[in-house]
Image (cartoon, helix red, strand yellow):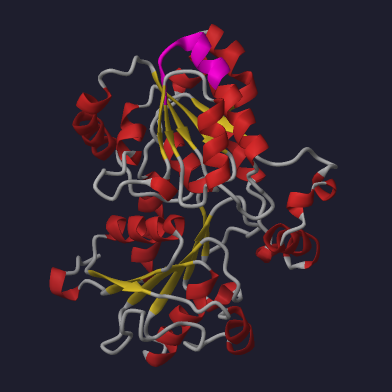
Amino acid sequence: MQRRTPSQEPRVWCLLGRKAGDNTQVLALADALGWPMERKTILARGWELLPHLMFRVTLLGIDQHASSPLTAPWPDLVISAGRRNEPVARWIKRQSGGRTKLVHLGRPWAPVESYDLIVSTPQYFLTPGPAVLINPLPLHQFTRASVDQAAIEAAPTLAHLPRPYTTVLIGGDSGPFVFTPQKGRLLAQGVNRLIRQTGGTALVSGSPRTPPAVAEAVSAALDVPAQCYWWHDRDPATPNPYAAYLGLADRFVVTGESMSMLAEAASLGRPLYIFDPGDAPGSWWSHAHTLRPKPLSHALAMRLAPPRMRRDVSRIQQALVGAGQARWLEEAPELIATGETWAKKMRPDPSVGAHVAAERIRALF
């Protein structure tokens, strides 16, 4: 097949929204393609769901003045993720006369045939096919070299903290998961037990989704050497240590509702322990914290929505455990006593999912 010259390479628009995890996947795929790329920030209005459900192919649900301009010349390829950007991507294709190809990451609300390729993961109930690629984990932008460099740069400021380093990555509320302060205390207690056995330090990073009350509960319950970074009280002058914490980790503890954090940790070949922030089976409806709009809407979708609209992140957790890439946090004391030999067999490739998806996209052109 004749290779394109740089001037002939397809032009790509990356639709970026408010969710960091979605944006990371979109940019990771664009990086793997290596084609000329333009970022388009799309800011949805609070009531965007109504026009999106009614009209499906529309810009009515976004703030066009605050969003990036969407004007000709139209791109050859649009990469999107998340419900809010779907109508925008389809609107762009309509303006291009159908020439623009659409690639969507995650779970589409529109029919599958609306897209040229969907790149998804096991928590969604999609069937693999010519237009549906199922990767084992979400895409991300970190490489071994990039996190190692971040670790080198951060090492002098952490030199006073004893090794080994246990990097603890904490998400927050998501779908059926409501992260309460009590769950934060349970997580901290599990980390305490682990570090008392191994020695060393907990390097803790929250996310934009981590509730402040959970951050406070974790900080208060940790009784081992620890350094914590919380988004809600971060110092703008202090660099975000997340990449450095990835590179410095001798092992990981990750909250199981965060697919992005699980993917980033699993790709780096270190022992990975999952903390499940879910509620015990059979007790979900008995908790007051589950009677909120997002958990309730998720529960209804799992019962009433078509399969392609459902989401069960436990499928990724179970797949990681079943493949020997992760273990549950409560198992850590016994596994550490054996030298964590289960983790020494892992040889993951951080970028393999993005490159597989990129090859599928190149085939479209």
Q: Is residue 74 above or below residue 126?
A: below
Residue 126 position by quadrant: bottom right
Residue 188 position by quadrant: top right
> From this viewpoint, is residue 319 visible?
yes
Q: Is residue 152 left or right of residue 301?
A: left
Q: Nearer the viewer, residue 157 or 59?
A: 157
Q: Is residue 69 above or below residue 278?
A: below
Residue occupying the point 75% across, 52% down: 290
Q: Is residue 183 left or right of residue 336?
A: right
Q: Is residue 308 magenta?
A: no
> From this viewpoint, is residue 258 visible?
no
Residue occupying the point 36% across, 80% down: 66
Q: Nearer the viewer, residue 43 or 118?
A: 43
Look at the image and tell me in which quarter the C terminus lies: bottom left
Q: Is residue 207 above or below residue 129?
A: above
Q: Is residue 198 magenta?
A: yes
Q: Position of residue 48 (x, y in %)?
A: 56, 80
Residue 334 position by quadrant: top right
Residue occupying the point 72% across, 59% down: 292
Q: Is residue 18 left or right of residue 161?
A: right
Q: Nearer the viewer, residue 229 or 269?
A: 229
Residue occupying the point 57% across, 16% down: 193
Q: Principal SS element in the magenta part?
A: helix
Look at the image and tell me in which quarter the N terminus lies: bottom left
Q: Position of residue 253 (x, y in %)?
A: 51, 30
Q: Position of residue 255 (x, y in %)?
A: 56, 38
Count of numbered tags: 0
Query: What residue range appears in magenta?
Result: 192-202
Q: Position of residue 325 (x, y in %)?
A: 52, 30
